[in-house]
């Protein structure tokens, strides 16, 4: 037997002991990102120091919610110097409707792949209003694809509340083209809305390339990842293959960097 064959045989035997019956070895997440809304107050004071601190925790991806007075080109340089990339940004529906070409240009300059609408105003959440929003999303998504980008929508709790008998999120799913409009599933808000995130991930494979990873206590409060009751291991084990980016977020952290670190360490060590 050749030496290489012996090494391969020994390796195969070891794998069989660790994961018997042909079971695959456990998977872990790839790059873990941070939605910078979590550290927005720090970003307002010092963009460079904040991004440096985020990088020092171990994050390699960030998602923007505003550029804090910096141009896309200037922000890209700051990212590069801190070994960070920004696959995604959140932009308002007004920007999408009124200034979409410039917004897309900025996203390209930042090196993004996705651009996400995170909010729909209350007056537009009626059945007719959501039909209009869906049409605008399709139009935005078509322009985004031409620019080499992918448009997406991020949910909140209100997306799952019935308005005149219709659920806004159901309208988004039914009335937007899956190729033009992807979805960023916020795991906290979908649970807060009384829904099962795993059911959506399994029913619409490939529709959710982005997730916001935030935890929830039993009484409905936001928590650092791993400190609440959401079963991330189960969700990612059953439906994680279609997810490309995992962004930690905490809307009102007690200590933004500490909270970001706790969540990162939990996800870094999570296997499924």
Image (spheres, rainbow, N blue to C red):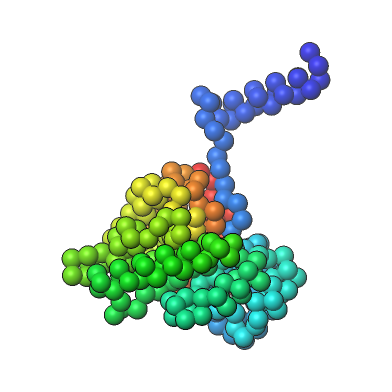
Position of residue 116 in the picture relative to residue 217 (left or right):
right
For the point 55% across and 39% down, which residue is it? 26
Depth check, front residue: 11 or 129: 129
For the point 56% across and 43% down, which residue is it? 27
Depth check, front residue: 95 or 223: 95
For the point 65% across and 62% down, which residue is it? 60
Position of residue 77 in the picture relative to residue 37 (left or right):
right
Residue 94 appears in the figure:
yes
For the point 47% across and 44% down, which residue is it? 237
**Is 190 rendered above or below residue 235?**
below
Position of residue 91 in the picture relative to residue 133 (left or right):
right
Tell me where residue 84 appears, x and y as whole percent: 68, 66
The outermost residue toward the left is 165
- Asked where in the image residue 187 lies, by quadrant, the reply is bottom left
Tell me where residue 11 appears, x and y as whole percent: 69, 26
Tell me where residue 132 appears, x and y as whole percent: 32, 71
Tell me where residue 38 appears, x and y as whole percent: 52, 73
Q: In the picture, which quadrant includes the N terminus?
A: top right
Depth check, front residue: 10 or 227: 10
Residue 57 appears in the figure:
no
**Is 70 rendered above or below residue 132?**
below
């Amino acid at each position: 037997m050749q030496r290489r064959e012996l090494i391969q045989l020994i390796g195969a035997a070891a794998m069989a002991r660790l994961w018997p019956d042909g079971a695959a070895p456990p998977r872990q997440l790839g790059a873990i990102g941070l939605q910078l809304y979590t550290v927005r107050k720090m970003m307002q004071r010092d963009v460079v120091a904040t991004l440096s601190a985020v990088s020092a925790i171990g994050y390699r991806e960030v998602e923007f919610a505003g550029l804090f007075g910096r141009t896309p080109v200037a922000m890209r340089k700051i990212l590069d110097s801190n070994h960070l990339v920004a696959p995604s940004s959140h932009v308002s529906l007004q920007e999408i409707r009124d200034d979409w070409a410039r917004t897309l240009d900025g996203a390209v300059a930042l090196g993004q792949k996705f651009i996400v609408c995170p909010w729909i105003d209350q007056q537009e959440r009626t059945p007719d209003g959501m039909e209009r929003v869906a049409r605008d999303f399709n139009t935005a998504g078509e322009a985004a694809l031409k620019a080499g980008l992918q448009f997406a929508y991020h949910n909140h709790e209100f997306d799952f509340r019935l308005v005149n008998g219709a659920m806004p999120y159901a309208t988004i799913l039914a009335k937007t083209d899956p190729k033009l409009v992807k979805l960023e599933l916020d795991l906290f808000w979908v649970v807060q809305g009384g829904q099962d995130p795993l059911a959506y991930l399994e029913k619409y494979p490939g529709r959710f390339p982005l997730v916001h990873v935030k935890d929830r206590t039993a009484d409905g409060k936001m928590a650092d990842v791993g400190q609440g009751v959401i079963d991330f291991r189960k969700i990612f084990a059953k439906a994680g293959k279609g997810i490309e980016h995992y962004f930690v977020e905490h809307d009102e952290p007690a200590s933004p960097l500490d909270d970001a670190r706790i969540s990162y360490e939990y996800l870094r060590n999570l296997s499924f």
